[in-house]
Image: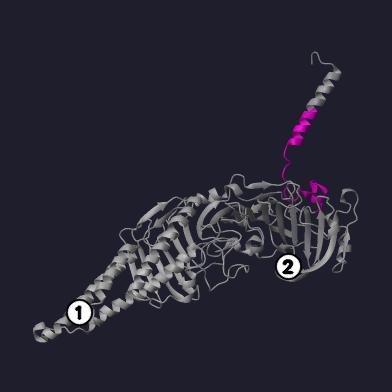
Amino acid sequence: MRGTSASGWFRLVSLVSAMAGCALAAEAPKPMTAGQGKDGPWWMRQTALTKDGKLSLKDKPWWPRAAKLKVGEQFIIDAPGELENRMLVRREKFRNRSAQVEAIVWIIDDDADGSLATGGDADSDCYVVDYGCDGTPDRMLDWIDNDGDNDPDEMDVRYFVGGELRQVWASFDYDDDNLMWNLAGYEYAGNFFNADAYGDAMIFMNKLNPERGEWWPVSECPFAFYDTDADGFSEVVVRVSAVPLGYNLGSDADYANDARRYRGPWTPDMRTMGNVNVRYGFDIDNLSGKEMPLHYEMGFNLVGAQPYQYPGMEHFNAKRRPPQVLRVTPFKDLRKISDAYPADETGFSWYEQEDDTTTIGHKWDSRKDRRWEGIFWIWERRFMGNTGGPCQRWNMRREWCGKKTDARELYYSGVDRRIHLFGASEGWLQIGHFAGQKSLGEIRMFDTDGNGFFDRWEVYWGDSPVPVRVSQVRDEKAKRIPFDYAELVKFHNDVVAPQAIAANKKLMTAMAKLRKFDVPPGPKTAMETGSPNEQRYAQDVVREMQYQDLRQHFTAKAGAVIAKAKQDDLRRLGPTKIPETWNTGSAWQLILALKDLDVAYGQGDFDAARAALDKIGKIEASVKP
C-alpha cells in the first residue's frame, strides 16, 4: 500500500482485527440445542444432554459416593477451579405430587453466590432430582435470574421419563412478584391456586423434539394472565391448546391435557403443531382483586386449526440450559392473536352464580368456587375438543355458534337484558343449586331466523318436560356492542346490571301488590350479597318464581270459572243464571290480560307488564270462583 510503512500496516491490520473482534463479541450468542451443552460454561457442561435428551447420573464421577448416602446425608463435590464448592449432592425423603419417595438431589450453584452453604436457593441454582436413587434423573428444576437482582424471572420444571427429557413446564414472571410454579418434591404440585395465576405472568409447556434437539410447543402453551389495572391481580386470562394439526378428535378429544401425549414418546405428527383451541376469559364486573381474586365472568371457547407459527415465538435465553429456545406465543401479542383467531366454532360462557353440586375452586374462600383458568366450556350438548376441565354446570350460561369467524362479536338484548354472542344459534342456562336451592329449571335460547340474535326463549320449570313459558319475539331489541374490554366492563357495570336490577325491582313490587309472594330465605340473601352480576341473577330467578306463581294462580282461577259454567240456552236457564254467564266473560277477560302480561314479560317490556298487572288487578275482583 502506497504511503504506508510496515509498522503502520501492522497497526492498521491490528486495528481492523480488533474492530472485527469487537463486532463478533457484540453478536448475540448462538442458541444451543440439546446435545450442545458440552460447549457452554462449566455449569451447563455438567448437565449436558444428548441430542435426544438423555442424561445419566451414573456417568458422573461422584455417583458411587452419592449412591451410598443415607437420608439426610450430603456432600460437596470435590472439584478444582471454578467448580470448587459449586455442587452439592444429598439424599432426601419427601412426598412429590403422587407418592412418598427417596431421591438423590444434585444442586448446582450457577451464579457462585455461595448458596450451597444453606442447601441451595431459588435464584440461579439448578436441581437435578433422581426419584428412587437409581442414577436416572426424573426432574430438573432450574431458576433463572435475568436481571441480577437475586430473584428469579424465569423457571423451568423439566420432566424426564427413563432418563430421557420429555417436557418442560416453563414460567415467565413479568410483574416480578417472585411467584411462579408451586412445587412439591421438585415438581409442579398440581394446585395452581398457590402459584402465579395473579398479575402479569405466563406459564406454558414445551416438548423436546428429539429429531432436532429443540423445544416444541405442546399442550397448554401458554396460560397467560393479564393485570389490566395494575393491582397485582389478573383480569384477563388466555389459554392455548397446542396439538398436532392432524390429531384425531375421536380418539384424542382432550389431547392438550393428556399426559400420555405430552410426556409420552415423540411421534411424527408432532412435527406440525397447531393452535386448535383458545380459551379467552374476562373479569367483567371489575371485582378481581385482593378481596375477590380470579373473579372472571365471561369466556370464549374458540376451536380452529391454525399452524402454531407466530412472529417472536422463539424465546432465547443464554442462561437457560440447552435447549435454550422456548417456543410460545409472545405475551404482548397473545390477546391480539386471540381477538382475531379464525374459529370454526365458538362457545360462549357467562358465569351467573355459584354451583353447589361441584367443588372446583380453592379452599381460600369456600363461598366462592372460582377457577384460576377463567371461564371455559363444558363437555356437554355441543362437544368442543381440547376445552379441558373441570367445569361448572349450573348457573353458567352457554351459547354456541357453528359459523366460521375471525372476530369476537357481542350484542346486548333488550329482551333478557343480557350480553350475548353474536351469531349464536342456540344456548342454555341450567338454573338451581345455589343459595340452598335444588334443581329449579332451565332456559333455552334460539335464533330461529339466522340473523345472529336470539328470538326465542323456552323456560322449563320444575318437573315439567315441556316449557312453562315460550317467548318468540319479532323484535329482538338487539344492539351490537364493540368487543373492547374496557368499554365492555363500563357498559355492563354502568348500564346492563343496574338497569336490569332496577327493572326487576319495579316488576317484582308490582306483582307483590297483586299477589303476596314469600321469597325463600336463601335466594333472598343472594339478591343482596355478592357482585351486582350475581345479585341480578338471584333476582332474575326469584322474579321467575314469583311470576310463575302469579301466572298459575290467576290462570287457574279463571279456568275454574269457565270449566264449571253450564253451557245451555239462556231462555231455558232463566234470568238467575245470567250472572254466571257474565262471570265466564270476566274470566275470559282475565285470561286475555294474562296473555298480555305473558307477551310483555317474555319480550322484556316490563312497563307493559306492569300495565297488564294493573288490568289483571281490576278484572280479577269481578271473577267469582
Three-letter amino acid code at the position of disc 2: Asn
**Res 155 quadrant in image:** bottom right
Residue 72 visible in the snapshot: yes
N-term-proximal mark, 2 vs 1 = 2
Which label sits on residue 96? 2
Question: Which residue appears farthest toward the front when viewing the image?
Answer: 513
Three-letter amino acid code at the position of disc 1: Asn
Residue 47 against residue 597 in the figure, above or below:
above
**Res 441 quadrant in image:** bottom left
Residue 61 against residue 566 in the figure, above or below:
above
| Front-most of residues 174 and 41 | 174
**39 part of magenta stretch:** yes
Distance between the alpha carbons at the discs numbered 2 and 1 = 78 Å
| Front-most of residues 359 and 284 | 284
Looking at the rendered image, the disc whose residue lies closer to the viewer, 2 or 1, is 1
Q: Position of residue 184 (x, y in %)?
A: 72, 65
**607 part of magenta stretch:** no
